[in-house]
Amino acid sequence: MPKLQGLNVLVVDDSEITRIMLVNLLEQEGAITTTAETGEVALNCVKEIQFDVILMDLYMPVCDGIEATKRIRALGISCPIIAVTSATESELKTLTEVGFNFVSYKPVELEKVIKIITMFV
């Protein structure tokens, strides 16, 4: 049985290549995916769909991942949000303060992403 069977996952990244790669991985493991290319689009998605987990890039135009996460948490949404980023160690404290649950570093290691998701759901 796929490891993520039936999980509803939002993938937020301004890189189309990253979105495609993550969606392919997640769907192979049974997840249902939705994508957003900016934090603003992600905010619209979470208002309409209940997600089991969100994979959020940090550095995006319009509304970055930190601002989007703050706004998602302000809506009372508590699902796990995993930063998918190349952030530095000094930035990590800020990430937990704004509401991220975990950090996965780029370049994305697919098996690690699955392991992280299964820790939270």
Image (cartoon, grey):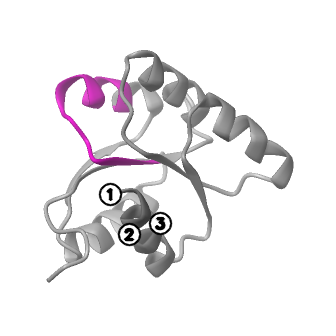
Task: State the residue position of label 1.
Answer: 121
Task: State the residue position of label 2.
Answer: 21
- Residue 116's disc is 3
Residue visible at 67% across and 39% down in the picture = 95
Q: Is residue 53 magenta?
A: yes
In the image: residue 29, left or right of residue 120: left
Q: Position of residue 82 (x, y in %)?
A: 50, 50
User: Mark 2 and mark 1: span between their CA atoms?
Assistant: 21 Å
Residues shaded magenta: 42-55
Q: Amino acid at mark 1?
A: Val
- Binning the other alpha carbons within 10 Å of mark 2 as few (below 14), some (14 to 19) or many (20 upward) gives few
Residue visible at 30% across and 63% down in the picture = 23
Question: Does residue 50 sit above or below 25 in this rendering?
Answer: above
Q: Is residue 41 magenta?
A: no
User: Mark 3 and mark 2: span between their CA atoms?
Assistant: 17 Å
Residue visible at 35% across and 29% down in the picture = 41
